[in-house]
Image: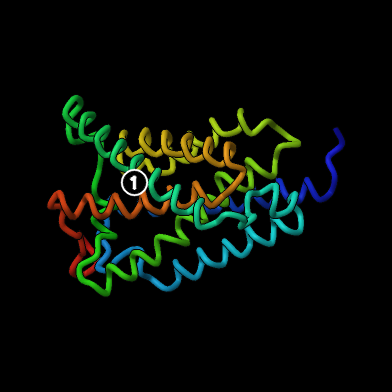
Amino acid sequence: MLLSVERALFLGSLALVIGAVAAGTVQSGLLLRRWTPPFNLLLTWPDNLLRLGLIALCIALGRWLGPGPAALGWDTGGLPAQLLWGAGLGLALAVTLSLGGWLAARRWGEDIYSNKMVQCILPLNGKEWLGVLLALLPAAALEEMLFRSLPLGGLTWLLSPWWLLWPLSLFFGLLHWPQGWWGVAGTALAGVALSLLFLATGSIWVPLAVHYVMNVSEIVFARWSGIDALRGTDGNE
C-alpha cells in the first residue's frame, strides 16, 4: 500500500509528539530521583498549559491529517451513559490494581513500588484538592489521545489495532518506571484494559472516564492509607 502524504505526516507527527512526551516523562523521573519539588507537581501553570496545548495539537492532527472524529472515537452520542459506565469501571479497576499492588508488595517487598510521584501531587488543602481534580482531567485526556485514540484509531491502515495495543501498553507502562516494578506492570495492565475498552466501544470517552477515575482513586486511596504529601522546603531533598 502506497503511503499518502497525509498518512505520512500523521504518522510522523504522532511519533514526534509521543516521543517528546516520553522524553519529558523520563527526564522528570530522573529529576525526581534527586529532587523533591517544593510545590504540587500537578498545579504549575506551564505544565498545565503545555498539556492543553498538546491536546489541541492532537485534535488538529486527528481532524486534518487523521481519519476524522468518528474513527478516533470522538463522537459524543450517548456521552452521559458512557461517562457513567466508565466511572464505575474505573473505580473497579482502581480497586483491583490497588489490591494487586498490595499483594505484590507482600510477596516481593515494598521496594517494588515507589510512592514519591503520588506524594508529590497529593493535595495539602481544599484548594489544592480542587486544583488536582481539575488538572488530572487534561493529564488523562492527553494520554488517552496519544496512547489510545490517535494510534489505535488512526493507524489501522498500518497495523491492526488489536496487535498495536500490546507494544503501546508496554511503552505506556515503561514511562511510569519511576514508580518501580509494580508501577510499570500495573500501568501496562491498565493500558491493555483501556485499549481494549477503546476498541470494544469505539469511543474515547469510556477509557477517558476510566483513566480519570483511576487517577483520582489512586490519590484518595493514598490519603486514606496515611501517605503524606511530600514537599521540599528549598527545592532539595
Q: In which quarter of the image is the N terminus?
A: top right
Front residue of 53/68: it is 68
| Residue 235 is at least partly visible in this image | yes
In percent of the image, x 53 and y 66: which residue is there? 52
Front residue of 193/17: it is 193
In percent of the image, x 25 and y 43: which residue is there? 114
In percent of the image, x 78 and y 46: which residue is there? 7
Mark 1 element type: helix
> How many labels sit on residues?
1
Above or below, comparing residue 217 to residue 131 in the picture: above
Q: Residues within 10 Å of mark 1 (few under 14, many from 20)?
A: many
* Residue 57 position in % (x across, y down): 63, 62
Q: Residue furthest top?
A: 107
Q: In which quarter of the image is the C terminus?
A: bottom left
* Residue 86 position in % (x across, y down): 45, 48
In percent of the image, x 41 and y 33: which residue is there? 189
Q: What's the amino acid at mark 1? A: Leu
Rendered image coloring scheme = rainbow
Q: Mark 1 points at which residue?
A: 91
- In the drawing, does residue 23 fall left or right of residue 189? right
| Residue 23 is at least partly visible in this image | no
* Residue 36 position in % (x across, y down): 25, 59
- In the drawing, does residue 157 fall left or right of residue 183? right
Which quadrant of the structure image shows residue 64? bottom right
Which quadrant of the structure image shows residue 40? bottom left
